[in-house]
Amino acid sequence: MESKPRTAVITGSTRGLGREMAVQFARAGYRVVVHGQDSARAEEVRQLCGPQAHVFLGDLSSRETAAQLMQFACDRCGSLDVLVSNAGIVKMEPFLEFREETWNQLVAIHLSGAFFCGQAAARIMAQTGGGRIINISTIAANFGQFGFTAYSPVKAGVEALTRVMAVELARHKISVNCIAPGPVWNDMMEHLYGPERLAERQRTIPLGRLAAAEEVAAAALYLCSPEAAYMTGQVLHLDGGASAAGPFTMEVFKRATASDSSS
């Protein structure tokens, strides 16, 4: 007997990492709900995901909209089995000039959005036998980085929220984990840093390259697999060894540079 198709809600899935996760989940047989705020991009991703995909547009820093998204998934797809809280933006400003509006925007989108979506999804999953929730963080949650006055703290908050959710929701058969990638080469990163700076950034990473979006999507699929059923409350770093190197990333860069000049 064939198993019932499962439904995955991927927030912030109209571009970059979220787009890739939506496509990979669809290819793995999931019914996917594509979320964003740009209708044209959302429809493009929906078509890539196939006829079983649906689009929901809205601002998830609103508790009501987050609840509507989860109910939409149940109504259109028949279930809610996986939530990937990926929606987010990156804005860099120097600490002394960091604006209150930028701070509030990043807190609302990253931290409040993950909370509202996670709570709304978990309320449904608790009534339907369980599920998997994945929050997306970044290795920047654990490092001081110029310009990341809000981005690093809110992602650290997302990781702390993951642990609290995992403990409280375990009795409902809901596992909650977090993926913290290093830099992922995509259009958003190219716009933020430019291709030249990204190419240089690769040389600070022990494996010598940035992550591919497909690799992060594969990690998310693993966390939803039967093999990961006993894994909850964890932060999975996917960074080519960057967090292992820690403050010695500059040493990695120097050695990479020296190796290039000697060859």
Image (cartoon, grey):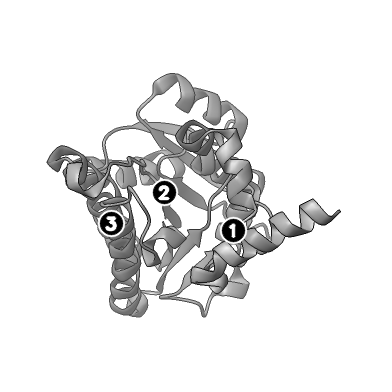
Q: Is residue 29 left or right of residue 55?
A: right
Residue 107 visible, this angle? yes
Residue depth check, mark 3 versus mark 2: number of the one nearer the observer: 3
Residue at screen point 61% across, 30% down: 48
Residue 102: x and y in percent read: 21, 40
**In what element is the residue under mark 2?**
loop
**In what element is the residue under mark 1?**
helix
Residue 223 visible, this angle? no
Residue 51: x and y in percent read: 58, 31
Q: CA distance from mark 1 to mark 3?
A: 24 Å
Q: Which disc is residue 86 wearing?
A: 2
Residue at screen point 56% across, 64% down: 249
Q: Earlier in the sequence, mark 2 or mark 1?
A: 2
Nearest to the observer: residue 204 or residue 222 = 204
Q: Amino acid at mark 2?
A: Asn
Residue depth check, mark 2 versus mark 1: number of the one nearer the observer: 2
Q: Which residue is mark 3?
A: 154
Q: Quadrant of residue 128?
A: bottom left
- Give the mark count: 3
